[in-house]
Image: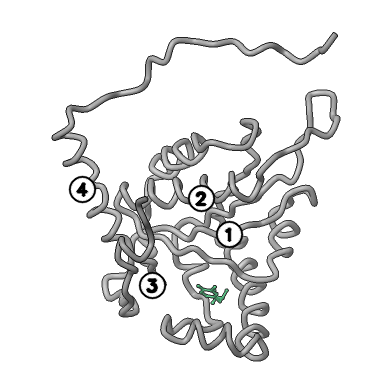
Amino acid sequence: MSDQPLAVFDPLTTYQEYPVREMVARSATFAAEMRRRRTVRQFSDRAVPEEVIRHCLVAAGSAPSGANMQPWHFVVVLSPGLKREIRAAAEAEEARFYREGPADWLAALAPLGTDEHKPYLETAPYLIVVFAQRYGRGPDGKRVKHYYVMESVGIACGVLITALHRAGLATLTHTPSPMGFLNRVLGRPSSERPVMIVVTGYPAPDAVVPRITRKPLDAIASFR
Ligand code: IYR
């Protein structure tokens, strides 16, 4: 006899259908709204209500995940002291990367104009540090297996960035490498792996973005 709880089903009451014309309009509007999103590297220190961040995290936590294990943890860093520590550690890692990283990688980044200086890690009101839980713990302290962890966390990050953008905030997906220092600085267990820092806030009034293009639909999708 299995001691697994059996599936319990409820009627699907939250789904919402739209008339086709509205569905077309909504999808077009959303695509246009997403195309406006740009990764920003100059942030204002203007305050952003924490409530907005909480709502965006609730949205991120709604992401689908392998076996519904929800293998993510988000640390919202507001403390100037912690931000300073994260910036110092990230800049030390990045200085090494920009000095002696792989030539092809550095060449690929050249059009973005990035460098080892990360002042936004202190300027922006929030750093949302996303951790992937390689495994969980049951109520009895036993290890619980997680499935498709990186896929699940990747989806949650996409929802988070989308939610922040829709709320009217700018984001920067920052992936200092290696990022192990984030476990130490934020006191997260070794079962968790830092995936990215989502820097968020208002853009600086004089923010600039690199001139880049996005692949057209026919280059990213095929219908057959
Ligand atoms: N982590 C470095 C380098 C970097 C890497 C990629 I891939 C980017 O798309 C952008 C930057 C940094 O943050 O500068």
Instruction: Give how far across and how far down residue 122 sits, in percent.
Output: 51, 67
Q: Residue at x 55, y 60 (%)?
A: 197
Q: Are marks 3 and 4 in contact (CB under 8 Å)?
A: no
Label 1 environment density (alpha carbons within 10 Å; few <14, some 14–19, many ≥20): many
Image position of 147 (left or right of 12): right
Is residue 126 or residue 114 the one in the foreground? 114
Q: Nearer the viewer, residue 61 or 81?
A: 61
SS class, disc 1: strand
The mark found on residue 196 in the picture is 1
* Image: 154 above or below 208: above
Q: Earlier in the sequence, mark 3 or mark 4?
A: 4
Which tag is nearer the camera, tag 1 or tag 4?
4
Q: Residues within 10 Å of mark 2 (few under 14, many from 20)?
A: many
Task: Report the coloring of the rendering.
Answer: one colour
Q: Amino acid at mark 2?
A: Cys
77 lies left or right of 24: right
Label ID, residue 42: 3
The residue singled out by tag 4 in the image is 28
**Which label lies toward us, 3 or 1?**
1
Identify the residue at image location x=66%, y=46%: 149
The alpha-carbon separation of the residues under discs 3 and 2 comes to 21 Å
Query: On the image, numbered disc 2 is attached to which residue?
Result: 157
The three-letter amino acid code for the residue at tag 3 is Gln
Report, in whole angstroms, how far the alpha carbon at label 4 lies from the one at label 2. 22 Å
Tell me the kind of residue under disc 4. Ala
Q: Residue at x 20, y 48 (%)?
A: 28
Crowding around mark 3 (Cα neighbors within 10 Å: few <14, some 14 to 19, many 20+) is: many
Q: Nearer the viewer, mark 3 or mark 4?
A: 4
Cβ atoms under marks 1 and 2 closer than 8 Å = yes
Q: Amino acid at mark 1?
A: Met
Q: Quadrant of residue 69?
A: top right
